[in-house]
Image (spheres, rainbow, N blue to C red):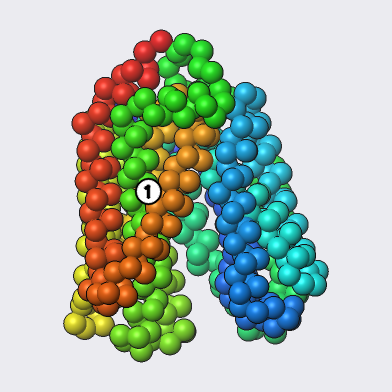
């Protein structure tokens, strides 16, 4: 561990290693371009449904194909990148695929063509799950990895601001129809992906201690992850976080409309503010996380458990707040804390596993969040029907506090597992 290096300015460390901010900026641009399709589908869903003559059930069924593909694609892409350094090429190619598919939404004529295009988008999106963060971790030395992961997370937060604004500007200011909007944002996405064409894969484990040859592939990766106590706890924490995330994404907007009568415009302003809070939190947290991880890695697990707890309690407090300013303040505090959860847990998980297993570890973590999301949806339906508003608070607080405890407990095993991982 190099605590002194982690405390130094980022540009100085990168200069010593002959590195630049281009790789993280290129991956950040890719993840922003990836958000155009989702934003377009969210904003233009009514026009798309009417234009294609679909029912609400038809549209929901077509979109479920995308989520099904996104659940499977990360593991497939991780397998393609397991034995050869091709993550950079795959990241750019899949970016061009989702760009072309976004533009192809303008040409859809019915349910089946829409489902086929959304399938392509879902498959291509898998690269953001299983390739981007392992590529960052292998590109940059350990002393600045938290800063790179938070910068990448900041690009994701920025996407929540830029993409909806772009779609709204094309429809509102320029008066374009939904087909023209998808064609334009698909073209813009492709141009953004070309910026990333200079990405190069540095090779697996470039900045890590040399160790014994590690067999690549899904089964060896799963066996190694299952045998690592820290990874087991983090993956369980990811699942519990997913169970928190689904109720939050469902309840906050509904609560602001039903309890405080905020219309769509006001809610849009709130969510834009929340994205900006998340962006600021990510930009401010990278260097402290690097310093904490280099000085005492277990502190990062404790910090991560703390921000999960603040997230859960903040959203629960917002649901119970007796006044709108208090509710908005609690929700914004929770959003700022929530932004730090994924980079911090990725820092732990991707550092403690063998470099050859990082892509599969990232994919498995995403699957854990998705599985937790399904449990969260079931919990929300069960408790809200029986307990009403109190049930909504339970659906947020219970999985959140459980996730906080599980992730924080990884601090007890992280140091030992890091030492084991570094042993040749």
In this image, 298 relative to 283: left or right? left
Q: Residue at x 62, y 38 (%)?
A: 76
Instruction: List the single residue furthest toward the left.
Output: 322
Asked which secondary structure carries label 1, the reply is helix
Residue 71 rendering spot, x and y as whole percentages: 55, 49
Residue 104 rendering spot, x and y as whole percentages: 77, 63
In this image, 177 relative to 275: left or right? right
Residue 269 rendering spot, x and y as whole percentages: 43, 78
> What quarter of the picture does the N terminus occupy?
top left
Tally of numbered discs = 1
Q: Residue at x 65, y 49 (%)?
A: 123
Viewer-side residue, 11 vs 227: 227
In this image, 408 relative to 8: left or right? left
Viewer-side residue, 334 vs 151: 334
> What quarter of the picture does the C terminus occupy?
top left
Look at the image and tell me whether residue 283 can be seen: no
**To which quarter of the image does residue 228 belong?**
top left
On screen, residue 90 above or below 49: above
| Residue wearing tag 1 | 239
On screen, residue 176 above or below 352: below
Viewer-side residue, 208 vs 118: 118
Look at the image and tell me whether residue 164 can be seen: yes
**To which quarter of the image does residue 102 belong?**
bottom right
Q: Residue at x 35, y 81 (%)?
A: 256
Residue 42 rendering spot, x and y as whole percentages: 57, 72
On screen, residue 350 above or below 125: above
User: Dot 1: few (<14), some (14–19), or many (≥20) neighbours within 10 Å?
Assistant: many
**To which quarter of the image does residue 365 belong?**
top left
Q: Residue at x 66, y 49 (%)?
A: 124
């Amino acid at each position: 561990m190099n605590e002194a290096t982690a405390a130094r300015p980022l540009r100085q460390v990168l200069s010593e290693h002959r590195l630049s901010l281009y790789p993280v900026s290129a991956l950040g641009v890719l993840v922003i371009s990836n958000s155009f399709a989702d934003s377009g589908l969210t904003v233009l869903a009514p026009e798309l449904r009417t234009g294609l003559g679909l029912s609400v059930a038809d549209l929901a069924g077509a979109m479920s194909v995308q989520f099904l593909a996104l659940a499977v694609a990360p593991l497939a892409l991780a397998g393609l990148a397991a034995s050869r350094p091709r993550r950079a090429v795959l990241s750019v190619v899949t970016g061009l695929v989702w760009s072309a598919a976004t533009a192809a939404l303008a040409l859809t004529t019915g349910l089946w063509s829409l489902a086929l295009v959304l399938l392509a988008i879902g498959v291509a999106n898998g690269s953001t799950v299983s390739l981007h963060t392992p590529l960052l971790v292998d590109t940059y030395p350990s002393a600045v990895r938290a800063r790179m992961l938070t910068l990448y997370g900041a690009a994701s937060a920025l996407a929540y601001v830029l993409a909806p604004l772009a779609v709204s500007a094309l429809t509102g200011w320029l008066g374009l129809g939904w087909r023209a909007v998808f064609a334009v944002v698909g073209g813009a996405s492709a141009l953004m992906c070309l910026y990333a064409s200079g990405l190069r894969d540095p090779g697996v484990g470039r900045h890590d201690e040399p160790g014994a040859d590690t067999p690549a592939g899904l089964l060896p990766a799963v066996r190694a992850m299952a045998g690592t106590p820290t990874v087991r706890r983090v993956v369980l924490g990811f699942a519990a976080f997913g169970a928190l995330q689904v109720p939050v994404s469902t309840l906050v907007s509904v609560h602001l409309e039903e309890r405080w009568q905020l219309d769509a415009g006001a809610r849009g302003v709130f969510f834009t503010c929340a994205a900006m809070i998340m962006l600021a939190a990510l930009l401010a947290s990278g260097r402290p996380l690097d310093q904490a991880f280099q000085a005492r890695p277990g502190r990062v697990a404790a910090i991560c458990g703390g921000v999960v707890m603040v997230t859960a309690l903040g959203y629960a407090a917002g649901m119970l707040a007796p006044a709108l300013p208090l509710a908005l303040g609690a929700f914004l505090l929770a959003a700022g804390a929530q932004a730090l959860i994924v980079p911090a847990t990725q820092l732990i998980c991707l550092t403690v596993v063998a470099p050859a297993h990082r892509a599969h570890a990232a994919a498995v973590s995403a699957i854990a969040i998705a599985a937790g999301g399904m449990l969260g949806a079931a919990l929300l339906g069960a408790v809200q029907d029986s307990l009403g508003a109190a049930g909504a608070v339970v659906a947020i607080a219970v999985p959140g506090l459980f996730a906080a405890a599980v992730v924080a407990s990884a601090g007890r095993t992280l140091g030992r597992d890091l030492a084991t991982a570094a042993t040749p």
